[in-house]
Image (spheres, rainbow, N blue to C red):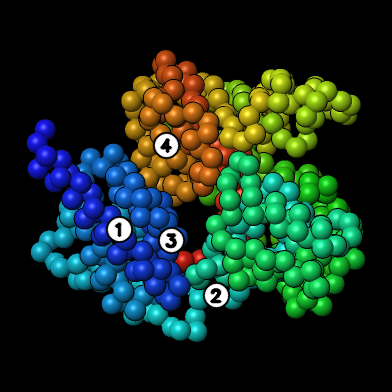
Amino acid sequence: MSQDKLDTYFQEWQAREAAAEAMIPMIGQLYRKYNVVTSIYGRALVNRSVIRILKDHRFVRKVEETELAVEDTHALLDAMLKLNLGPAHVDVGKLAVKFKQENAGRDVEAFLRDELAEVVGQYQESSQGGEPQDVVLYGFGRIGRLVARILVEKAGGGSLLRLRAIVVRGQGSAADLEKRASLLRRDSVHGPFQGTISVDVENNAMMINGNYVQIIYSDAPDQIDYTQYGIDKAVVVDNTGKWRDEAGLGLHLKAKGVARALLTAPGKGDIKNIVFGINDDEISAEDQVLSAASCTTNAIVPVLKAINDKFGIHHGHVETVHAYTNDQNLIDNYHKAERRGRSAPLNMVLTETGAAKAVAKALPELKGKLTGNAIRVPTPNVSMAILNLTLEKETQVEEMNEYLRWTSLYSPMQKQIDYVDSPEVVSSDFVGNRHAGIVDGKATIISGQQAVLYVWYDNEFGYSCQVVRILQKISNVDFKVFPQDR
């Protein structure tokens, strides 16, 4: 190949880099001034690098079989800044493809005025689309720290969720605060925190990307007075798993300044187990205690619903291949549960899961149709659910995969279901994936009415994203979404 040809390739790459770099301040202004969150086929653009933006454009060619140039989305962003938009979530990737396919002679601004008509000219400097909601994290383990990261990340623009306090056990000290800040700052699985964290030892607080977060030491949920810290009508996210029933979680409601409690584990008794995107419409204003169910339930329920809606499920078995958790032992030692006392990093450990039975709480139509079991394996994060299903209708691999791919892109469950068809992906590729579950199309097996599907899920981060979505729901954080998917 000639040197001129090589130079041309590199010059084209540099031009794309420059265009993507020019998009970053536009994305930031839409986010921070107008409370407009932009994305490309569900992949958020806010606070993303130049290379990440280019990769998201590349992804569109695989999805739509058409090239999406950075210049296309740049033109849309430039036009959006002139429209004084109200709060919204806008998928500029989908809009750019739609514009190329059906602009009917309109220029970009005229096209956007039609597509975004509900929010054009709706910008109000004092309005963010609702009232800010105080959030308290009770417990600061794996899920607590990830929820904190997500809340702080979203606070940079128009998110109405405000992380105000973190409650931990023990007595406060400078060393304790520094250790907890360090655990938030550095994570062996999810990498470094994107931002800065400083510690206010005198006031028992952390400053996290400009968010002042009170650290409260307490062993009793009902003994805390949050109002003394200026916190009121807060949602307490209980990450401890210590209390799972109405009586135990009800202790949070006895604390001054608390309006609701959300459990990041399966709830017991009559507590509603919510899988966002599936049964969050069951949440009522009277529900003071809710559960976000389990990571596995969140991973499998959206996929099961999609399959049941299209093909029907007669019965099935769910086998979970799950990363080990803090509940297991590093080395062989006593544990009250069967087998979990054996060394987690050295063994595959057969154990139980309630995820299959829990499906019925979100999808009553599948009650009694599923069995389940689990194997804990020596990886620290990202799990897999194997769905072995007998369908009511016969199908083929191509039909099933195309349906699930479409569902991941255009259905109301597009934030819950992702789809991948690469023959080379492994578990670590899904660390940080924000979906509840990711269907591995290459692994799908179909024989008539028998179907076997493999669903990856980041049992820490993907689940934490689902928790935050419930927080947004119960806090009436609701934005117009564009475009309206087909």
Q: Residue 246: percent from the left, percent from the top?
A: 82, 53
Q: Give whichever of discs 3 and 2 has the lower sequence position.
A: 3
Q: Secondary structure at mark 1?
A: helix
Separation of marks 4 and 2 at Cα, in angstroms: 33 Å
The quadrant of the rendering that contains the N terminus is: top left
Q: Residue 349: percent from the left, percent from the top?
A: 72, 21
Residue 445 sits above or below residue 195 on the image:
above
Q: Sort mark 1 into few (<14), some (14-19) or many (20+) by Cα contacts within 10 Å.
A: many
- Please name which of the two marks, 4 or 2, marks the residue nearer to the observer: 4
Q: Give whichever of discs 4 and 2 has the lower sequence position.
A: 2
- Please name which of the two marks, 3 or 1, marks the residue nearer to the observer: 1
- Please name which of the two marks, 3 or 2, marks the residue nearer to the observer: 3
Separation of marks 4 and 1 at Cα, in angstroms: 25 Å
Q: How many marks?
A: 4
Q: Are marks 3 and 1 in contact (CB under 8 Å)?
A: no
* Nearer-the-camera pick, 316 or 129: 129
Judged left or right of residue 279, residue 293 is right
Residue 144 sits above or below residue 125 on the image:
above
Q: Which residue is mark 4?
A: 419
| Residue at point 75%, 55% (across, down) | 180
Q: Secondary structure at mark 2?
A: loop
Q: Are marks 4 and 1 in contact (CB under 8 Å)?
A: no
